[in-house]
Image: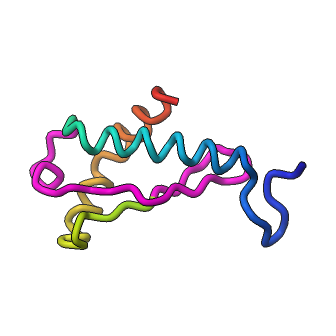
Amino acid sequence: SRAHQKGGEPSQRMLRVGELVRHAMSELLTRGELNDPVLDTHVVTVPRVKMSPDLKLATVYVMPLGGQDSGPVLAALERHRKFLRGEVARKI
């Protein structure tokens, strides 16, 4: 079966891998390993991860609990992008 037909639903494999990435990212954000003052004071949830059909790219949707300070939280996550990417890749 094709991974993703035009306008179709994601494949089961895309959904499974997306869920693995979501769990890995959630765990990283709750363990407090990033040593970032913004992230240390906010709870960040990962409601959804969308995988590309070839499973090489993950779009991770994040949300600070209560929707507060989303700009500073996104900027902090962007600063740690390389670390987060490497840790998620290592975990799954």
> How many numbered tags mark residues here?
0
Residue 43 quadrant: bottom left
The residue drawn where x is 37% and y is 40% is 84
Q: Is residue 5 above or below residue 89?
A: below
Relative to 25, is 67 on the left or the right? left
Rendered image coloring scheme: rainbow
- Position of 31 relative to 91 (above/below): below
The quadrant in which residue 33 appears is top left
Q: Front-most of 11 and 77?
A: 11
Residue 26 located left or right of residue 1? left
Q: Is residue 76 above or below residue 81?
A: below
Residue 86 image point, x, y percent: 43, 33
Q: Residue at x 57, y 48 (%)?
A: 18
Instruction: Examine the structure image and report whether residue 63 is included in the region drawn in magenta.
Output: no
Give the farthest residue toward the top.
90
Q: What x and y, as percent, mark residue 78?
A: 32, 55
* Residue range highlighted in magenta: 34-60
